[in-house]
Image (cartoon, rainbow, N blue to C red):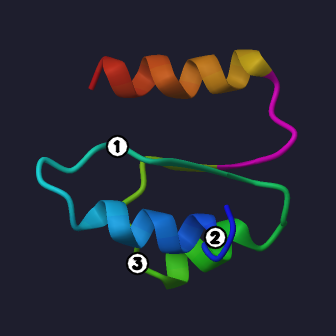
Amino acid sequence: MPGLDGIEVARLIDKLQPRPSVILMSGHADCVRDANNAKLQVFGVIDKPIPLRALKRFIEQKLTD
């Protein structure tokens, strides 16, 4: 995403109404810390590469909330 990282996109999404659920995926180990420090209301933060089964579980969990 030229000019934006996932944290910035999540900040922009956080302002939308109704607010969509966000799952951040990152190849950087400090992404979880950065998301927590930014006080983002994200559903989950997962490291890349992510097995498709794990991503499927995240999505299914959110859909059943």
| Residue at 70 percent of width and 24 percent of height | 54
Q: Position of residue 12 (x, y in %)?
A: 35, 69
Residue 22 lies, with reference to residue 15, above or below; the image says above
Question: Circle 1: is it few (<14), some (14-19), or many (20+) Cα within 10 Å?
Answer: some
Q: CA distance from mark 3 to mark 2?
A: 15 Å
Q: Amino acid at mark 2?
A: Asp
User: Is residue 32 found inside the magenta-colored segment of the image?
Assistant: no
Residue 10 lies, with reference to residue 4, above or below; the image says above
- Which mark, by number, is residue 51? none
Tell which circle, 3 or 2, labels the residue nearer the N-terminal end: 2
Question: Circle 3: is it few (<14), some (14-19), or many (20+) Cα within 10 Å?
Answer: few
Q: CA distance from mark 1 to mark 3?
A: 15 Å
Overall secondary structure of the magenta section: loop
Q: Amino acid at mark 3?
A: Lys
- Which mark, by number, is residue 5? 2
Segment tinted magenta in the rendering: 46-51
- Which mark, by number, is residue 21? 1
Q: Quadrant of the N terminus?
A: bottom right
Tell which circle, 2 or 1, labels the residue nearer the N-terminal end: 2
Q: Secondary structure at mark 3?
A: loop
Q: Are marks 2 and 1 in contact (CB under 8 Å)?
A: no
Q: Secondary structure at mark 2?
A: loop
Q: Position of residue 15 (x, y in %)?
A: 22, 67
